[in-house]
Image (cartoon, helix red, strand yellow):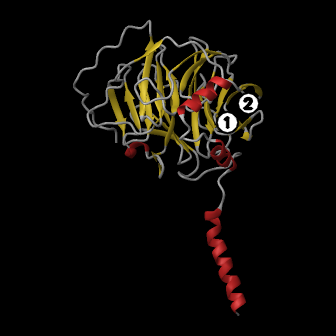
Amino acid sequence: MKIRFSVVALTLVLMFASPLAQPPAVGQQAAAAAAPRPDTPPAEVAKDLADHYQSGPQLPYHLVAGWPDMPKGYNFGESSGVDVDKQDNVWIANRGAYPVMEFDKTGKFVQGWTDDTVRLTSSPTHGTGSHGIRVDPDGNIWLIDVDGHLLHKYNQQGRRLMVIGTRQGTPSNNDSQVGFNRPTNLWFLPNRDFYVTDGYGNSRVIEFNKNGEYIRHWGTPGKGDSQFTLPHSVTVDSKGTVYVADRVNKRVQVFTPEGQFITKWTDVGQPWGLYYVAKENVIYMCDGLYNRITKISLEGKVLGQMSSFGKAPGKLDFAHEIAVDSQGSIYVAEIKNLRVQKWVRNSAAAPAAKSAAPAAAPAAKK
């Protein structure tokens, strides 16, 4: 009788305990194992960059000091995403009280959306789960809820227009046509179709049409061609060639529009954010491990670079995502420094001095 009771008790314990004992997804395990140590001395990181990766001349840019002009009492949380619209207004995703914030190019605060508007999933380690943000060709704002496994589409007034994914907080597997597992970012084509990198839990790129309907996906966990360990950003050039930031594998992989492997760049650093600029026919990349901004040709050659690790204005720590406006100004969102910084070309007029008075805080969108 005691033996039978013990067996039943053990069975019940295992039944209830087993969900808690499930290992993380394969992509998450690989990413965790290969992630850089957060306390690696900066000198060691800089030496690794110099020893193993391309370098280039200093990019001809200077920092716009004090950008943006935050209203009194406002601060960013961890800044995870940045993009610009056709008016060169800047849209920022961050993990603070206002997960989406809009500024004009001079740094004037336009609006902020609270969690009542965007309803992001909270994480015990980094607050609300914003990640990538992109503006589509029609001016709509697309926001990644990384911990909710969702992609949201809003108009510029904060009205939600579409949600892609399964129920908030429910991950999907690497072959799902309807959901994600901790997606990271996206990029739009001229016809409004788009690619999504998916991400921390899965290891793939997904293509959707403009109506949010699945077209195709490619990628599996690993280090081989067409495999990924944390696909973190994606961009597309004017010919439709797709460039994917394979973050933990420290490479950019290049594909046809249908996902056929073309080549890989293994000596440009660790890509966290990629942004194609049609006027220059180049890609700008932010590197959150080596903390630099690079300008890269479509053949994978580093044409220029700027910045390095640090806390002072102009320096970087966990440079997470990048955007470039119509004038060539560069914006970088940082995780550890909790900010977004702006650089302009040296040939541009010097930015106007900021007034001493902080901007007034307009009413937040609800």
- For the residue pair 149 and 23, the one nearer the viewer reads as 23
Across and down, in percent, residue 325 comes to: 47, 18
Is residue 99 toward the left or the right of residue 224 in the image? Answer: left
Query: Disc 1 marks which residue?
Result: 205
- For the residue pair 7 and 211, the one nearer the viewer reads as 7
- For the residue pair 213 and 100, the one nearer the viewer reads as 100
Q: Residue at the location (35% across, 13% down)?
A: 351
Q: Quadrant of residue 245?
A: top right
Amino acid type at circle 2 is: Gly
Is residue 212 toward the left or the right of residue 315 in the image? Answer: right
Across and down, in percent, residue 108 comes to: 32, 24
Amino acid type at circle 1 is: Val
Q: Quadrant of residue 282?
A: top right
Is residue 139 at least partly visible in the picture? no
Label 2 element class = loop
Label 2 neighbour load within 10 Å: few <14, some 14-19, many 20+: some
Label 1 element class = strand
- For the residue pair 290 and 258, the one nearer the viewer reads as 290
Q: Which of marks 1 and 2 is nearer the N terminus?
A: 1
Task: Identify whether 168 is placed above or below 360.
Answer: below
Q: Which mark is residue 259?
A: 2
Quadrant the N terminus occupies:
bottom right
Across and down, in percent, residue 38 comes to: 54, 41
Report, in whole angstroms, how far the alpha carbon at label 1 lies from the one at label 2: 8 Å
Mark 1 in CB contact with mark 2 (< 8 angstroms): yes
Label 1 neighbour load within 10 Å: few <14, some 14-19, many 20+: many
Q: Residue at the location (59% across, 37% down)?
A: 212
